[in-house]
Amino acid sequence: MVITVSHANRLRGTIHVPGDKSISHRGVIFGALAQGTTRLDNFLMADDCINTIRIFGQMGIDIDIKGHNTVVVQGKGIYGLSAPEVQLDAGNSGTTARLLMGLLTGQDFDSILTGDDSLKRRPMDRVVIPLRAMGAQLMGIENKEFLPMAVKGSRAKLQSIDYTMPVASAQVKSSLILASMYADKSSRIHQPAISRNHTEIMLETFGGRIHTNEKTITTYPEPTLYGQDLLIPGDISSAAYFITAALLTPDSEIVLKNVGINPTRSGILDVYKSMGASISIERIHSGGKEPSADIIVKGSPLKGTVVEGSLIPRLIDELPIIALAATQAEGTTLIKDAEELKVKESNRIDSTVGILKEFGANIEATPDGMIIEGPTVLFGTQHRPGSDHRMVMMATIAGLIAQGSTTIHDANWVNISYPGFFEQVEALRC
Ligand code: S3P
């Protein structure tokens, strides 16, 4: 699919962004491992999460999709999964692959996990190394530590782990939490910085025991989990595109309804506020452990900033769109400590810099981030952002800001996380 985006003079309106991707994946996983029925409302019906649903179906779990975005999972308990007859294909989804690796090591059956060409190139050693230390047997079939990977069910042999993670990754942490449910005794996981804590919250919500003390997590084996009814908040990583579009388009005002504002995810709001953005948070629902709120954003002049350190895991997926905002901010923006961007769906340091340079931005890559000088006028052009959904969406928002018209090839990659994205962008013009 090829789309054309033209410059926007003003953006106004109200948007319901789709459900949170990370929470949707985990809802299916914990729903499958629970006893009884789990109902997930506002589930993200996008390719990544549909892959997770399909995989659990292939392991004998009944999952019904009701209406547009409700998923009902008939859980079978932590020992209820059955051996798949096919390779489990996570598609483009790193979260599915890495979380599944931990879970599959705790089963009493063997399996093969695979993914699309992009996922086959992404590093799996970050989960393979600690899982092997627990006694798991994982073997890359074509290439040692990459997908496709054979996972030997090691239920009877899994040992607990006391592990210091070299990178702040929620996927690694979650994989180990899932494996540790099948270990012989309690495990401890030390994080270098706090990353999204949806797995910890969900395990507890489903009745499991888990303890977090600053950056250390203690987990306990053999939890009994009970099915839950969850309303999944809107995804702040999806909201980020509209927040940025409204900030950068003068005289704009948009309302984003029911967006998840879990502090481990809301770093972008802190960064934009420090850049001078007019953002207000209203109607906060903090009843559950995953708070949500309406976010009201007005077009604002921005100034450069520094994004670094423990902020990085709180906004890792938003860095490409923050870089776009920085091209319109007065002064220098420095993004540091963000080497993790290199191992996302694309090398997001190179792809962000490449795309924004094509638009005429003053941006340079550094070994661990980017330096952006602003403000610069952007000019629409032809783009091939490749197979990375977040780069397609960033280039689309750049097209709204840019002079002239922008053509984006392979735009269908948005379906990984945000079907309906282009229609919602167009609905805001006025
Ligand atoms: C995710 C964690 C992050 C993030 C990804 C989703 C998750 O990856 O980039 O989009 O749901 O756990 P890392 O854990 O590798 O940083």
Image: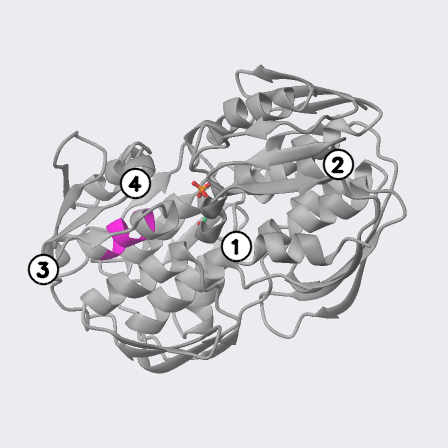
Q: Secondary structure at mark 3?
A: loop
Q: CA distance from mark 4 to mark 2?
A: 40 Å
Residue 319 visible to the viewer: no
Q: CA distance from mark 3 to mark 1?
A: 34 Å
Q: Nearer the viewer, mark 4 or mark 1?
A: 1
Name the spot of residue 320 as percent of width and height, x first: 60, 34
Is 142 situated left or right of 407 in this image?
Answer: left
Q: Which residue is mark 3?
A: 109
The kind of residue tagged 1 is Tyr
Q: Residues within 10 Å of mark 2 (few under 14, many from 20)?
A: many
Q: CA distance from mark 4 to mark 3?
A: 19 Å
Segment tinted magenta in the rendering = 98-103
Q: Which mark is residue 401?
A: 2
Q: Nearer the viewer, residue 398 or 322?
A: 398
The kind of residue tagged 3 is Phe
Beta carbon of the mark 1 residue lies under 8 A of ligand 1: no
Name the spot of residue 405 as percent of width and height, x first: 69, 34
Q: Earlier in the sequence, mark 4 or mark 1?
A: 4
Q: Secondary structure at mark 4?
A: helix
Residue at 39% across / 54% down in the picture? Answer: 48
**Magenta residues: mostly which secondary structure?**
helix
Residue 100 covered by magenta stretch = yes
Is 208 situated left or right of 60 in this image?
Answer: right
Q: Which residue is mark 4?
A: 127
Q: Earlier in the sequence, mark 3 or mark 1?
A: 3
Q: Nearer the viewer, mark 2 or mark 1?
A: 2
Q: Residues within 10 Å of mark 4 (few under 14, many from 20)?
A: many
Beta carbon of the mark 3 residue lies under 8 A of ligand 1: no
Residue 257 vs 306, above or below: the answer is below
Q: Which residue is mark 1?
A: 418
Q: Nearer the viewer, residue 239 or 283?
A: 239
Q: Earlier in the sequence, mark 3 or mark 2?
A: 3
